[in-house]
Image (spheres, rainbow, N blue to C red):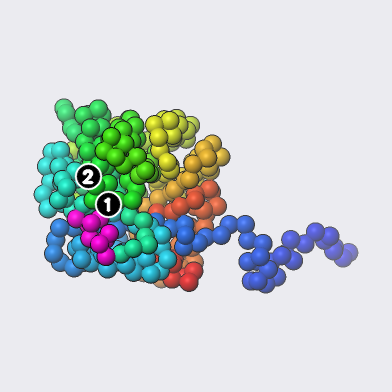
Amino acid sequence: MSIRPYFRPRRLRNSEEIRRMVRETQLSVDDLIYPLFVTHEMTSKAAIASMPGQYQLSVEALVAEVGEAQRLGIPAVILFGLPKEKDALGSDSYNDGGIIQQAVQAIKETVSGITVMTDVCFCEYTDHGHCGVVKDNYVDNDATLELLAKQAVSHATAGADMVAPSGMIDGMVAAIREGLDDAGFERLPILSYAVKYASAFYGPFRDAVDSSPQFGDRRTHQMDPANAVEAIREATLDVEEGADMLMVKPALSYLDVIRIMKERFDLPLAAYNVSGEYSMVKAAAQNGWIDEKAVALEILTSIKRAGADLILTYHAKDVAQWLG
């Protein structure tokens, strides 16, 4: 008996040209935000052992890296700072001469045509490694809000184009919006880490910025990985407080949450392809177990397909060159 199917979906897979024509999800360099680490150290660049291909950069080296990203067509970078000294309040984060402020000013003096975003948080700057003011071994939410606003205004004054609060502190968007508006920065947008989970995928990042908590963990403010409905409540609050864009972090294990956010909210949506996701791909590729390019592009396409408009990824430069 000869079976001749009437419907043949394979007809539209016959060639690369046809596959390109009917492709539903397009990954573009325009989707990328490149995270970078800047340090007070004068050494040009120090390799991050747990994040192959990533570095702690001096201000001078950072400017060169941002310039290269701009030439590759990457539209934005986001900066994370390693201060010279840490203290209980993370004061370098809102010091007008702090490492992020120096970095933003140096970029703005040298590189044009790229958006400079800054992470607004405290874990890299505090000697206890937590995301705000600690009282009785607990992050004091309301005491932290005032300092978050102060930090955001300092970054804006240095020339940042966008600020991105990441601490999951209740009311953080409202406090930062009020602080920015009162300081004359009402045009500066806020990208809120609205849905940030207490994830095990952050390990390499904490190596990169020396931000591991000195006691306890961050589960009292970052979200439980088991929860999805809670993400809607968190994002709703940030939208009501004035967020201009939303983020889900991490991305790969939370594709379902990205889809929920995309369907529920009409703001631009970012997703963070975090350090652990990046480092797993790098480690497997170095062992010859996977094709790094193919796997990285597949992962990033899945994040875009889930609904992300923008993707923060350490693979940004590689992707820009691969997509060429």
Q: Residue furthest front?
A: 184
**Looking at the image, which residue is at 31% across and 42% down?**
185
Find out whether residue 58 is within the magenta segment. no
Q: Position of residue 189 (x, y in %)?
A: 38, 44
**Looking at the image, which residue is at 48% across and 72% down?**
324
**Looking at the image, which residue is at 47% across and 45% down?**
269
Q: Main secondary structure of the magenta part?
A: helix
Q: Dot 1, how many residues are within 10 Å of its Cα: few (below 14), some (14-19), or many (20+)?
A: many
- With 83 as the anchor, is 19 left or right in this view? right
- With 173 as the anchor, is 264 left or right in this view? right
Q: Position of residue 314 (x, y in %)?
A: 36, 60
- With 277 as the anchor, is 12 left or right in this view? right
Sequence order check, earlier mark of 2 and 1: 2
Which residue is tagged 2? 154
For this rendering, which residue is in front, 56 or 267? 267
Q: In terms of secondary structure, where does tag 1 sit?
A: loop
Quadrant in the picture for residue 240 = top left
At label 1, which amino acid type do we have?
Answer: Gly
The reply to whether residue 135 is in sight is: yes
The magenta segment is: 102-110
The reply to whether residue 212 is in sight is: no
Q: Position of residue 64 (x, y in %)?
A: 27, 68
Which residue is tagged 1? 159
